[in-house]
Image (cartoon, grey):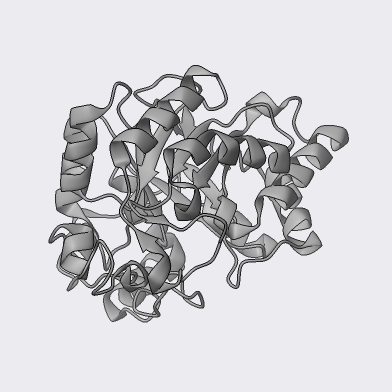
C-alpha cells in the first residue's frame, strides 16, 4: 500500500488520514466480530476510525485499540485519528461535555482527534435511536451547543471540533457565531450525490469535507442500491479493471475529500485501501459528472409537521 495521504485541519492537531474506517453497522450493535475486524484493519494500515455514540461501536473500537497496542501493531494511541459524534439526544448545552466524557470512557481514551455534532437537530435526552420518535424532535440551540463544543476543545478532550449533515446555510450561520470554526463537515458524498455547491462552500471556508456512504450504504436503514447498480460506474469499472467500489472511492478521493469506507471483510478492507496509485481519466470523470443526482439519505427521520423541520427542503436549506 502507498503511504496514506493526510490533510491538515484548520484547527491544528494531527493531520487526518484521507481514508478512514467507518464503524456503523445497521442495526446498531456492539460485537466481538467488530472488535476483531477493527484490530485487523489496524494491522492492514488503517489509522483513521469513525464512530459515534449512536453506533454502539465506541466500546469495540476502544477494545481493538487496546488490543493493537498490546500486540505492537501500533506503538501509541497517537498514531491513530479517532472521530466520534454527539448524538441528537445530547445536543443540549449542559449535556455536551458529559456525552464526550462518556464517549472517552467507552473508547478508553484521554482525547478524541475530532468530535462532531451528528445532526443539526436535538431530540429529548436519554434515547440513542435512529429513527427518533417524531414527538421527540426539538429545536437545536446551535449557538449554545457550539459553545459547549468549544469548551470541550479548550479542555483538551478533543483536538478538533466539527459538524455532520450541515448545509451551506447552516454552516454559514455557525461560522457567524463560532469562536472556533468547524474543522470538518461529514456528509453523504458519492457519484450519485456529488454535493458540488456544498463542497465548494466548504473549500472556500477552510472546512474539510469527509464523505460518508461513498458506495450508497446499501443494506442500511438510510442507504440505497443506486450507486452499486449504476450502469455508468459499472462500465468504467470494467474498462479500468477495478471494482465499482474502487471507482467510487477514487472519485471521492480526487475531489479532495476524506472518505469513510466500511467493510469488515479482509479482502474488501485491502481493496478499499488500493485507490492511491492510479487515477481516473478526464473522460471518466466527465462521465461521472453527468450522472443524474439523487440523495440516498434525505433525512425524513428528522422531518415532521410538528417538528422544527417540516420538510426536507428546510432540513437541507434547498440543497436536495
Which residue occupies the foreground of this view, 60 or 261? 60
Q: How many marks?
A: 0
Q: Considering only vertical position in the picture, is 70 above or below 186?
A: above
Which residue occupies the foreground of this view, 163 or 287? 163
Residue at image point 16% right, 43% down: 200
Classify residue 265 as left or right of residue 90: right
Residue lying farthest right?
Answer: 70
Location of residue 134 (image quadrant): bottom left
Residue at image point 21% right, 59% down: 316
Q: Considering only vertical position in the picture, is 223 above or below 187?
A: below
Residue 63 is at least partly visible in this image: yes
Position of residue 106 measured from the top left corner of the image (x, y, whole percent): 71, 43
- Which quadrant is home to the N terminus? top right
Residue at image point 27% right, 75% down: 232
Position of residue 198 measured from the top left corner of the image (x, y, whole percent): 19, 49
Residue at image point 46% right, 58% down: 124
Classify residue 7 as left or right of residue 306: right
Position of residue 188 measured from the top left corner of the image (x, y, whole percent): 34, 58
Classify residue 221 as left or right of residue 224: right
Q: Considering only vertical position in the picture, is 84 above or below 230?
A: above
Amino acid at each position: 500500500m502507498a503511504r496514506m495521504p493526510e490533510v491538515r485541519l484548520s484547527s491544528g492537531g494531527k493531520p487526518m488520514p484521507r481514508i478512514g474506517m467507518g464503524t456503523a453497522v445497521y442495526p446498531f450493535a456492539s460485537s466481538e466480530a467488530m472488535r476483531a475486524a477493527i484490530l485487523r484493519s489496524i494491522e492492514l494500515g488503517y489509522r483513521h476510525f469513525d464512530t459515534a455514540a449512536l453506533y454502539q461501536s465506541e466500546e469495540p473500537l476502544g477494545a481493538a485499540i487496546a488490543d493493537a497496542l498490546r500486540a505492537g501493531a501500533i506503538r501509541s494511541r497517537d498514531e491513530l485519528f479517532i472521530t466520534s459524534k454527539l448524538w441528537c439526544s445530547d445536543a443540549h448545552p449542559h449535556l455536551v461535555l458529559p456525552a464526550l466524557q462518556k464517549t472517552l470512557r467507552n473508547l478508553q481514551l484521554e482525547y478524541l482527534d475530532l468530535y462532531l455534532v451528528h445532526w443539526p437537530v436535538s431530540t429529548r435526552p436519554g434515547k440513542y435511536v435512529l429513527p427518533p420518535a417524531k414527538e421527540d424532535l426539538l429545536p437545536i440551540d446551535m449557538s449554545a451547543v457550539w459553545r459547549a463544543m468549544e469548551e470541550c476543545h479548550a479542555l483538551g478532550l478533543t483536538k478538533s471540533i466539527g459538524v455532520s449533515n450541515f448545509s451551506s446555510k447552516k454552516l454559514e450561520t455557525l461560522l457567524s457565531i463560532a469562536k472556533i470554526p468547524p474543522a470538518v463537515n461529514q456528509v453523504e458524498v458519492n457519484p450519485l450525490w456529488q454535493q458540488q455547491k456544498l463542497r465548494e462552500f466548504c473549500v472556500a471556508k477552510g472546512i474539510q469535507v469527509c464523505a460518508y456512504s461513498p458506495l450508497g450504504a446499501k443494506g442500511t436503514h438510510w442507504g440505497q442500491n443506486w450507486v452499486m447498480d449504476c450502469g455508468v460506474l459499472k462500465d468504467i469499472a470494467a474498462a479500468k479493471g477495478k471494482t465499482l467500489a474502487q471507482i467510487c472511492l477514487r472519485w471521492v478521493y480526487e475531489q479532495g475529500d476524506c472518505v469513510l469506507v466500511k467493510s469488515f471483510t479482509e479482502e474488501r478492507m485491502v481493496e478499499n485501501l488500493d485507490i492511491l496509485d492510479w487515477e481516473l481519466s478526464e473522460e471518466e470523470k466527465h462521465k461521472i459528472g453527468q450522472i443524474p443526482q439523487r440523495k440516498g439519505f434525505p433525512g425524513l427521520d428528522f422531518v415532521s409537521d410538528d417538528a422544527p423541520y417540516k420538510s426536507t427542503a428546510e432540513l437541507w436549506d434547498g440543497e436536495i
